[in-house]
Image (cartoon, coloured by chain):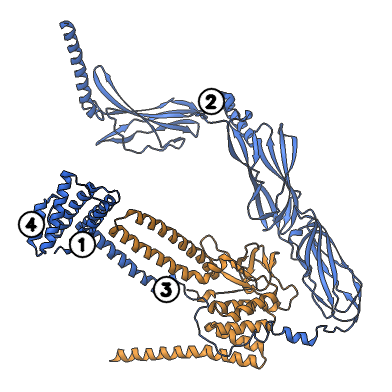
Amino acid sequence: MKPRIVLTLLAVISFLSSLLMGSEEDRLFYDGVRAEASGDLDQAVHFYLQAAKLSHSSNLHGNLANLYFKKEQFGHAILHFRKALLLEPTNKELSINLQFAYEMAKTPPLPNDFAHSYFASDTFSFWCVLCAVVFWFGFLVFIYLFFFNPSRAVLFYFTIGWIFSGGLTGYATHFSHIQNSELLREGIAILPTENEANQTKNISLRRFAGETNSANTTLLPGQSLIIDLGKEGKIRTHESADGKNWFLARSQDGKKKGWIKEDEFGWLIDRSKRK
Amino acid sequence: MVKNGSTLSSRSQSKLWIILFVSLLLPGIEEIHGQQLRVESSFQPPSITIANNSVYKIIIHGSQENPQGSLPQIPGISISNSPQTFRSASFINGVPSVRLEMSFQIKPKKIGTHTIPPWTIKVGSTTLQVPGSSIKVVAANQEDKIKQQAEERQKEDLSQASFIEFINPRKFLFEGETVSGLLNLFIWDRLPVSRIERPPQKEGDAFSLTELRQPQEKRNQTKYGKTYTVFSWPTGLTAAIAGQQQIQFNTSIRVRVKSRGNSPFTSPFFNDPFFGFGREESLTVKSDLINIEVRELPMIERPDSFRGAIGKFSCRSIPDSDRVSLGDPIRLVVEITGTGNFSAMPAPVLNSNSNFKIGPPAFSFEGNEITMHEGKQLFEYILTPLKPGLISIPVITFSYFDPAREEYFTSKTNNHPLRVDPGETWVDPTPVQQQTETSDFAVSTTDLFQTENEPGEWFQNVKHKTAINSQVFWSLQSIPLFCAIGLGFYGWKRKQSGRDLFRQRQSILKKQMKESITFNDASLFFRATRERLRLEIGTFYKHPNPSSLSSNELTTLLQSSSNEEDTISEIEKILEISDDHEFAGTLKDPQSLEDLYKHINNLLKKIQ
């Protein structure tokens, strides 16, 4: 009897703790809404950021982005609009707000060409499933034709068609996989809080990972950047003598490259929560 | 004739003996029984100069089998690991003899007498001892020295045929400093170069190099007693990492060389690259490894306004106006002139204040754009006065490090007074009516940035899981996999049982019948009909060999079961027509053949 009671108690405790955890992020969200309504934007941002450490929702990141926009911190605003859109890609209001934030930040918006729309990172699952369906359907028909249909011509033409369609879907899956893996390394250039009021309004990509190094090039707040991979497929990072982490980044179009400090950009997908 | 015949027979007899003897000898050629196994070893020649090579030879008499053993290593000589092997068989005084020779290349390292001590090898199951042998290595003689000198000269000639030279004006650099250098590619006039494949590239990450454009070409330049054509690229070299650094340049050129020996034209004329013959090969040309010391910039007395400019500069600012109305922008150009690292120079800091709102500057450079080392850097700022009155344009402080004097210097721009007139009050010219009309079409800002009061659905990650990370996706793959395995297995079993063969034959016979209707070939039609009846009726009643059934046997089979009399008689009739046609050749019109085809199909369906 005893182990059963212990197990039941553990289950109840874990259920209650999960409920409590759930209510914590809700509580922080509502605190944020109240603070925003009373006009205390800094306090509202603080509450929303606390909630974002626990969990994510499109409304949370949307609200956070709106607050940053009001504070004219367009880099942060673009970062959180992008996060909100990752959680709710079909939300048109968020898309319009993001476009507006890009305009205000004078930052070029994300490319919307053929490759970035049909093979975008969020299409990866679709292409995966389609690839699997084409493969298995073709394979089953192939076996049927091979064993049950005496006509070899039909089998030949079907095999050609199967390989062709399989190749197309395989290519699309591969391409969207590249976009998907780039998303995991994508960041948005932001001005560190202490520099928000500064004159330059640009984020430096330095020649070498060091504060005193001259800038190779600069990025505008809100511009996307991709962190480079090293030889072992790991993110290229460097810890400077003052304990700051630096990352080797390049702009989305690949034309600008240099080292960037960890507080000068925000990850679209938090590294600590990746699986 | 008889004599001749006896001669022929004796000749053929002797040939037969030789063949018999060789055939007896051949199986035992590996090892001849009776011949004693022994080993000899020697150096050939036993005395050499230090510049020459010798051969260490081991001869195994009585076997041609590969021996096993490890050759001892001697400090004063190096012995090659890949010996040349030679097998021979001979008759010595009518006794067959075989032997195996192994030759190892020997290269001397030291002068003196070097001895390989006795060592053991294993031939088959027999262990043999290789006797010791010595080689004497003497000092190089005059001939060796001449040969060596010739080789060195040849190497020197080759390295002097084409090379890269970097002319660096300074012995050491400071971190971040840019110097203007010259890259010279020397190509000997006697080297048949067809083209330069690419401009020189640097090796090493401690420096950055400006883009190399079209080179300048100079002919008839003399160096090392040779005449060269020199291609020069002016370039800017920037030191990036402090410390003792090395840099090297390389490029590749296309040269014409002699054709290989398998050319169909044996004449030297056709192989001579100077006459446009021969083949092209890529040749890599390198510079010497250049050591450059890169020093760190001094931290002492570094001004706060220093932002990385290294060189010698002067600075001034030029406003485009000294009187404006409030709200009208003025353009302020900051001009930095001199020599230094223009490519890495950031804009001087000019912050907004209570008097001016200042935008980010625009950059432009006038001067040598290849090296970016000497010229004029212009920063253009847009200043918008924020209050009326007599105000001053901010003074710009620009600091740089002079590498020649190894000191920091700070220069300031002049103070420019600016009169700002109050101007007229701005009135919105747009009529109120028009505003209300257009407001319907504009994006309402109140709709944008509206706070959501509910958190919505919570997620642990910003990004949803992809299909390949989902267990459901991979689990679902098992369904078609099992289906494919099942279908494949069923198809294979079916193929094994022969049902597939029956269907194939049935399909072929049907096709033949249809073709014979099309071409009005009654003979083929009835032959195919009879075959089809045999196949289908025989298979239906599980006859082991349906194609062997006669018409009578088919009728008997049909009668043995509960078939209708009409069906049996109809089939019997068709079989009879088929047999008749086979012998009498009765002609049928295509329409009747087609009807008959349909009739046969119906009849075969009725068989029970």
For marks 3 and 1 on the same chain, the one whose residue lies earlier in the sequence: 3
Pointer 2 residue: B265
Residue in the foreground of this view, choosing between B559 and B371: B559
Q: Secondary structure at mark 3?
A: loop
Give the foreground label among 1 and 4.
1
Residues under labels 2 and 3: Cα distance? 68 Å
For marks 2 and 4 on the same chain, the one whose residue lies earlier in the sequence: 2
Q: Quadrant of residue B499?
A: bottom left
Q: Are marks 2 and 1 on the same chain?
A: yes
For marks 3 and 4 on the same chain, the one whose residue lies earlier in the sequence: 3
Across and down, in percent, residue B365 comes to 79, 59
Pointer 1 residue: B602
Task: Report the amino acid beneath label 3.
Answer: Ser
Colour in which the image shows chain A: orange
Colour in which the image shows chain B: blue
Pointer 3 residue: B470
Q: Are marks 3 and 1 on the same chain?
A: yes
For marks 2 and 1 on the same chain, the one whose residue lies earlier in the sequence: 2
Q: Secondary structure at mark 2?
A: loop
Task: Report the amino acid beneath label 4.
Answer: Thr
